[in-house]
Image (cartoon, rainbow, N blue to C red):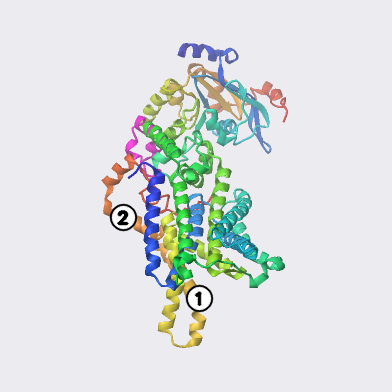
């Protein structure tokens, strides 16, 4: 499968079955263009990394996919259907995201945090929880079991009853990941998963991310924004490089490493006018 | 511990009911009336502690929602009176009407509230608290302005005996209302809805990404607390057998909030302590002034005011010494007694109602998040 992926990524247009596809996404905040005609495809079961210098628009791209930012132009499709994302409906569509930093609920225990990640998937009516009908009890027990299994999987079950603020940073990161996974998403968006982690923890994280597409009970396609280049090169089959809101390179980690445009974007260069031909395309879409 | 939440909560509710039933016989009519008043307050404070402590929405307008309930009961009861309805069940109809009307009012405020945060929400509800009582003056022909309405109330059922005090009957009614409120709110806050509310309170963005409808949850919480306030206000009307703007003045809203914070924000048991204090403090303060100060003029000046001062002082002390309120202190003491290991073991087996267990919903933190 990995080989098929690697071949597919060379010409993304011919990739067999993109789970998520962005076409011509542009976002402007006032006069600032945060994303400019960004198109990319995430193949099903693949792991795609988004990299780029600070302010390149990586997190904005995630915010567009999640519906926090409405694009001025462009379309998103998810599993073959057009996606008009609204944040609280994503879980139902099979998309989960972790936040930069942590974003755990400080007033909930670790277990409750993970349980909360399932959202409304198992619909328990307001009425039946008002009188605590047995079936709302049963659904809660089931959910607690699923959440506990995630904690066990990440070897953090011992913290189940603790509040997240009391815990070491790497544990909190794992809790956030467990919360994102509890709803069994088919697409997982990881926003700087390695941020603030030590090298041992990053090793563990890399192994975990690599295992995500092959998880039992439904693997997940992964998209991650990350500054930690070693992690990206290690886990991603395809890397998209953003700079000033534009895609300046797409390819396998090896291709990206050798791409002069990428080195330029990161290290700076006099030749900043090099990508002028793309300007015309950016204004093409309807606002 | 039973695996069924309903069964567990029902056992506690029935046990409290039996205890309080016995208590009403042990108390004289004046004490029964105090018990009834505390129970009526509890309906409202329990709803408010859920709203402010668990869903993170601060409301200064619960007194106004109680007024809505109170006036609804008055109007419906008086219609029953005018048509010579003599069944006790009619009161149930009035109270249900009070709950419904207050819920609708709560939904309207809640929809606006879901767009507002922190001090702005407090401001909006403050306006509601100040404005609603003056509606009584606006529709003078129907609501009789500052004078208010008297509430038609049947005497205690004849089967209880001719000498059965009305106050004891009122205490029964109010205690039943309070217990049902506590049961429903206990179920809600220990289940998925409670977790959802607390998630929304803690981090709205993360809550959205977890699939939670943030605005929907906030409005629902507001409606639930409004329904409770409506029931509490209706019950107060039944107790006083009258309603007037003065009975539901802005100080009532403030007192409810004080009671909730002193009792322990977000904790239903804390709401019990708060409601009891709301009734006991004014009475104790009056007793104190009467025994310490012999000048009638000074007594008159202090009457009613001393309790407010004590309540304010208590609030300051609680905020400094025990931000989790009375229930927070009790939880801490309980935890120390039970010890750590047992808690962890019990937790993995079956976490139960958020009030009783170590993972009390942020009772120990200041629970109104400031976005």
The percent position of residue B65, horizontal first and vertical second, equals: 59, 59
Q: Which chain's residue wears label 2?
A: B
- Give the total number of marks visible in the rendering: 2
Q: In this view, does B1 lie above or below B262?
A: above
Name which quarter of the figure residue B336 lies in: bottom left
Up the image or down, A264 lies above or below A145; here it is: above
Distance in Å between CA atoms under marks 2 and 1:
35 Å
What residue is shown at x 47% (from left), y 24% (from top)? A220
Mark 2 and mark 1 on one chain: yes
**Which chain is home to disc 1?**
B
Q: Where is the N terminus of chain B found, in terms of image quarters?
A: top left
Q: Residue furthest bottom?
A: B295
Q: Is mark 2 on a helix, strand or loop?
A: helix
The stretch drawn in magenta includes residue A34 = no
Instruction: Write down the residue under mark 2.
Output: B334
**Residue B119: x %, y % from top left:** 57, 56
**Is A273 in front, or is B80?**
B80
Q: Tell me whether circle 2 and circle 1 mark residues in contact (CB < 8 Å).
A: no
Q: Where is residue A195 in the image (x, y as percent from the top left)?
A: 44, 34
**Part of the protein shown in magenta:** A150-175
Seen in the picture, residue B74 relative to A228 is either above or below; the reply is below
| Among numbered discs 2 and 1, the one appearing first in the sequence | 1
Q: Dot 2 surroundings within 10 Å: few (below 14), some, or many (20 or more)?
A: some
Residue annotated with mark 1: B305
Task: Choose top left, top right, bottom left or bottom right for residue A247.
Answer: top right
| Kind of element beneath mark 1 | helix
Q: How crowded is mark 1: few (under 14 residues within 10 Å), some or many (20 or more)?
A: some
Which of the numbered marks, if any, corresponds to residue B61?
none
Name the main secondary structure of what is drawn in magenta: helix
Q: Is any part of residue A195 visible from this angle? A: no
From where the camera sits, is residue A40 visible?
A: yes
Q: Residue B270, position in %: x, y?
A: 42, 58
């Amino acid at each position: 499968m990995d080989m098929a992926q690697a071949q597919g990524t060379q010409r993304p247009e011919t990739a067999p079955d993109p789970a998520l596809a962005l076409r011509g996404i542009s976002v402007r905040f006032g006069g600032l263009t945060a994303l400019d005609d960004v198109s990319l495809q995430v193949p099903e079961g693949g792991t795609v990394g988004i990299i780029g210098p600070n302010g390149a628009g990586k997190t904005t791209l995630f915010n567009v996919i999640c519906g926090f930012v409405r694009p001025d132009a462009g379309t998103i499709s998810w599993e073959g259907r057009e996606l008009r994302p609204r944040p609280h409906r994503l879980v139902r569509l099979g998309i989960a995201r972790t936040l930069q930093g942590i974003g755990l609920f400080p007033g909930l225990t670790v277990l409750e945090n993970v349980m909360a990640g399932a959202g409304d998937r198992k619909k328990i009516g307001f009425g039946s929880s008002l009188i605590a009908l047995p079936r709302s009890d049963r659904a809660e027990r089931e959910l607690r079991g699923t959440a506990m299994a995630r904690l066990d999987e990440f070897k953090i079950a011992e913290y189940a009853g603790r509040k997240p603020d009391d815990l070491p940073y790497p544990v909190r990161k794992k809790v956030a990941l467990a919360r994102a996974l509890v709803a069994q998403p088919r697409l997982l968006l990881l926003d700087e998963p390695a941020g603030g982690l030590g090298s041992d923890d990053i090793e563990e994280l890399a192994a975990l991310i690599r295992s995500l597409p092959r998880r039992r009970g439904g693997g997940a396609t992964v998209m991650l924004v990350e500054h930690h280049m070693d992690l990206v090169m290690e886990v991603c089959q395809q890397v998209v490089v953003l700079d000033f809101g534009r895609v300046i390179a797409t390819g396998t980690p090896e291709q990206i490493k050798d791409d002069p445009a990428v080195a330029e974007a990161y290290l700076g260069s006099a030749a900043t006018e090099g990508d002028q031909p793309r300007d015309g395309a950016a204004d093409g879409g309807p606002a | 511990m039973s695996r069924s939440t309903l069964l567990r909560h029902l056992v506690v509710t029935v046990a409290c009911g039996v205890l309080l039933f016995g208590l009403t016989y042990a108390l004289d009519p004046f004490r029964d009336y105090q018990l009834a008043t505390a129970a009526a307050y509890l309906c409202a404070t329990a709803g408010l502690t859920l709203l402010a402590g668990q869903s993170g929405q601060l409301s200064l307008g619960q007194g106004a929602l109680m007024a809505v309930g109170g006036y609804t009961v008055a109007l419906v009861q008086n219609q029953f009176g005018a048509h010579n309805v003599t069944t006790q069940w009619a009161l149930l109809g009035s109270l249900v009407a009070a709950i419904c009307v207050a819920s609708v009012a709560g939904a309207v405020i809640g929809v606006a509230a879901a767009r507002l945060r922190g001090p702005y929400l407090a401001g909006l509800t403050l306006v509601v608290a100040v404005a609603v009582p003056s509606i009584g003056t606006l529709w003078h022909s129907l609501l009789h302005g500052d004078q208010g309405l008297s509430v038609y109330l049947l005497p205690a059922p004849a089967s209880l005996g001719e000498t059965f005090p009305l106050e004891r009957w009122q205490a029964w009614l109010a205690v039943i209302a309070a217990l049902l409120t506590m049961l429903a709110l206990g179920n809600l806050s220990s289940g998925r809805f409670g977790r959802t509310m607390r998630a929304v309170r803690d981090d709205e963005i993360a809550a959205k990404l977890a699939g939670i409808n943030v605005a929907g949850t906030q409005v629902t919480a507001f409606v639930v607390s409004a329904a409770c306030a409506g029931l509490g206000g209706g019950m107060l009307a039944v107790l006083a057998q009258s309603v007037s703007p003065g009975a539901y003045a802005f100080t009532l809203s403030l007192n409810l909030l004080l009671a909730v914070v002193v009792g322990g924000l977000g904790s239903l048991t804390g709401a019990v302590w708060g409601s009891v204090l709301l009734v006991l403090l004014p009475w104790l303060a009056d007793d104190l002034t009467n025994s310490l100060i012999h000048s009638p003029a000074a007594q008159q000046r202090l009457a009613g005011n001393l309790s407010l001062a004590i309540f304010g002082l208590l609030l300051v002390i609680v905020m400094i010494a025990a931000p989790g309120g009375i229930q927070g202190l009790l939880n801490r003491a309980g935890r120390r007694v039970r010890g750590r290991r047992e808690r962890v073991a019990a937790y993995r087996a079956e976490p139960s109602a958020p009030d009783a267990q170590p993972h009390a919903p942020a009772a120990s933190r200041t629970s109104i998040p400031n976005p």
